[in-house]
Image (cartoon, helix red, strand yellow):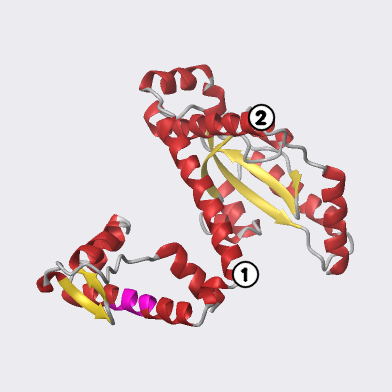
């Protein structure tokens, strides 16, 4: 019941006016005792929905009635909760206070987000100066996992991976080898093909090695979590067209600006994090499990 009432408080308060005598009867959809739900009330609630949700509920009289019935149920539940004194309970008031704080902070965050305006020139300039950050390469892979049934799973997997890499570098079809040996079912079904990846997909050592590959070159096995990885470059590394990463760059720059603003607020409000105490708390929680 607590969760239901909090949701009602947070998400729905239809303006049912019991003192407005001038309301036209033709505008009233529902009477709940002395309260009313009008066409205007329902329209206001519909306008709070996303365009997709609104289009669903306004697609037919049946769907609109379903929306109305939901709000009627919420309203009578709310009235009954108030009658029982639930709204005055401490746990409810605490939840309302918490929701209020989150709503206020979220509203400020939204307003800050809307204040960050970037021009096409600024985004393009960032792309031109940081093109290497968006470098990509089209790859295929073969993953050889450690086999727990082997006496030495790691050594066994390495020997198998080295053999596969050697055969691939000797000219055998990487696709056929992937189909035969790869332990990654998703890429195996695609004959090892992964497609384009960007920098940072793998640990730095592997990342550097991959992005120095030329078309058709194949790596020696790299140890990764749970096994060994062999990579083939299907094309030379290149850069995506600006139009393809424009929105990504816009989001990155806006997020960076917001983070800088929040960090300045943290300094302004003299935030101090006691990491040793946080570590103690984490260890304590782990020990209790």
- Of residue 124 and residue 44, the one placed in the foreground of this image is 44
Report helix, strand or loop for mark 2: helix
Whole-percent x, y for residue 201 in the image: 62, 40
- Per the rendering, the mark at residue 188 is none
Residue situated in front as seen by the camera: 168 or 78: 78
Q: Give the residues drawn in magenta, as a range.
A: 69-75
Would residue 18 be found to the left or right of residue 94 on screen?
left
On screen, residue 80 above or below 99:
below
Q: Would you identify the image quadrant in which residue 76 lies?
A: bottom left
Q: Residues within 10 Å of mark 1 (few under 14, many from 20)?
A: few
Q: Residue at x 11, y 69 (%)?
A: 24
Magenta stretch prevailing secondary structure: helix
Query: Mark 2 or mark 1, which has the lower sequence index?
Result: 1
Q: Is residue 213 magenta?
A: no
Q: Residue at x 54, y 62 (%)?
A: 96
* Percent coordinates x, y for residue 183 in the rendering: 66, 59
Q: x and y percent of residue 228 in the render? A: 74, 49
Indicate whether 263 appears above or below 22. above
- Marks 2 and 1, Cα distance to the nearest angstrom? 33 Å
Residue 272 in the figure: left or right of residue 251? right
- The answer to which quarter of the image holds residue 70 is bottom left
The reply, left or right, for residue 33 in relation to residue 177 is left
* Residue 135 visible in rendering: no
Q: Which residue is mark 1?
A: 90
The numbered dot on residue 268 is 2
Residue at image position (60%, 34%) is 262
């Amino acid at each position: 019941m607590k969760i239901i009432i909090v949701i009602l408080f947070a998400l729905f308060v239809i303006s049912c006016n019991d003192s407005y005598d001038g309301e036209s009867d033709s505008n009233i959809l529902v009477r709940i005792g002395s309260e009313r739900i009008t066409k205007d009330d329902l329209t206001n609630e519909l306008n709070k929905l996303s365009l997709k949700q609104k289009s669903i509920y306004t697609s037919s009289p049946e769907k609109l009635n379903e929306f109305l019935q939901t709000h009627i149920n919420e309203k009578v539940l709310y009235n009954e909760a108030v009658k029982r004194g639930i709204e005055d309970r401490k746990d409810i008031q605490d939840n309302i206070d918490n929701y209020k704080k989150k709503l206020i902070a979220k509203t400020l965050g939204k307003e800050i987000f809307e204040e960050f305006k970037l021009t096409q020139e600024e985004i393009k300039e960032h792309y031109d100066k940081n093109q290497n950050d968006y470098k990509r390469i089209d790859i295929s892979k073969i993953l050889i996992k450690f086999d727990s049934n082997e006496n030495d799973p790691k050594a066994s997997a390495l020997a198998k991976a080295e053999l596969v890499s050697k055969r691939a570098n000797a000219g055998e079809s990487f696709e056929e080898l992937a189909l035969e040996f790869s332990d990654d079912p998703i890429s195996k079904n695609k004959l090892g093909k992964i497609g384009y990846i960007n920098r940072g997909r793998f640990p730095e050592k592997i990342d550097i090695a991959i992005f120095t590959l030329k078309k058709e070159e194949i790596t020696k096995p790299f140890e990764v979590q749970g096994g060994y990885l062999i990579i083939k470059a299907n094309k030379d590394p290149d850069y995506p067209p600006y139009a393809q990463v424009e929105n990504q760059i816009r989001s990155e720059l806006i997020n960076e600006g917001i983070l800088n603003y929040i960090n300045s607020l943290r300094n302004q409000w003299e935030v101090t994090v006691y990491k040793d105490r946080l570590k103690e708390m984490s260890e304590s929680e782990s020990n209790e499990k």
